[in-house]
Image (cartoon, grey):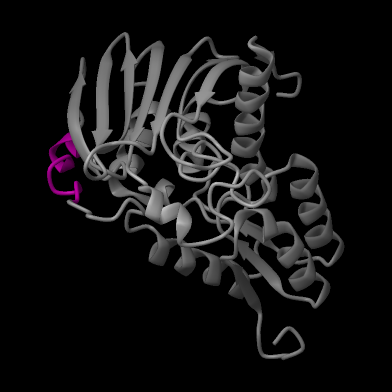
Amino acid sequence: MLQLNDIDLISICTPSGLHPQHGILAARYGKHVLVEKPMAVQLQDADKLIKACCNARKSLFVVLQNRLNPAIGLLRKAIDEGRFGKIFLIASNVFWTRPQQYYDMAYWRGTRELDGGAFMNQGSHYIDMIQWLAGPVDSITAEIATLDRDIETEDFGSAIIRFHSGVIATINITMLAYPENLEGSITVLGKTGTARVGGIAMNRIEHWNFHDYQEYDEQINSISSNSSSVYGSGHSGYYTQVIKAIENKSRPRPASILLADGIEGKKSLAIVTAIYQSSRQNSSVFIKSR
């Protein structure tokens, strides 16, 4: 397949731990690479993938499709315009269910080497969303646990993230919600605004209150969706943008745009890695690079 000349882009949808290996192979054959989250389960493997695509002069796209959710787009707009004033807290909850049968269906699920855990796998989008909204991270304090599922990795965890901007974020993740997926939300609390995007995939604006008023505030009901999928509805839009980028021979940067390159995709992976390190050490982990 990789030897076919009429293939421009390879989409990597294999087990998470194999993403770098398959992406590097695709790049070496001169293909652009589109990789599902997380782009790797080890930071050094993510670096190898980034380097391979760079050396081959091929674009690397990391699928972070929830950035395209209309509700999230409105939230980002309000933040960019300063409508929250000083932001005090960003809180995210991922209360989903993954029964034992889910893990038993595939040998790689729930393994450290190929899956990574609830934060690494199911939580990647929400960690990306927090850092996309709040910016560079200073420190992370976290606890993880395997409370019920028969797996190597965690099915529950909580983290406190302190950002360089002074914002504090919390994220709670569990795969133990009964009897079905309950919530995938993000809440922003600021001096002059409060907003909550909920549903099961950050797909519905549930609270929207600001000191000022803007015309687009009237859109909060019309853009909310009732998605029944935890994956949301952003994949088709993300693929469309990827195709346009390839056709226009443009790079998926800067980071402020909706397409994420390898450097942007690595940010959430670095946070997850620090979450696991903090839990192992039972102490805060400080992030040096900004």
The residue depicted at 32 percent of the width and 43 percent of the height is: 97
The residue depicted at 53 percent of the width and 19 percent of the height is: 143
| Magenta span | 215-225
Q: Is residue 224 magenta?
A: yes
Q: Is residue 24 shown above or below 192?
A: below
Q: Is residue 84 shown above or below 71?
A: above
The residue depicted at 34 percent of the width and 36 percent of the height is: 176
Q: Is residue 30 left or right of residue 170?
A: right
Q: Position of residue 228 (x, y in %)?
A: 22, 55
Q: Is residue 232 shown above or below 160?
A: below
Q: Quadrant of the C terminus?
A: top right
Q: Position of residue 63 (x, y in %)?
A: 53, 56
Q: Is residue 260 shown above or below 117?
A: below
- Using the rendered view, name the quadrant where residue 148 is placed: top left
Q: Nearer the viewer, residue 184 or 81?
A: 184
Q: Nearer the viewer, residue 232 or 290?
A: 232
- Using the rendered view, name the quadrant where residue 194 is placed: top left
Q: Is residue 91 left or right of residue 30?
A: left
Q: Position of residue 66 (x, y in %)?
A: 40, 48
Q: Is residue 167 left or right of residue 139?
A: left
Q: Position of residue 224 (x, y in %)?
A: 19, 46
Label total for image: 0
Residue farthest to the right, as pictured? 55
Q: Is residue 241 magenta?
A: no
Q: Is residue 170 left or right of residue 70?
A: right
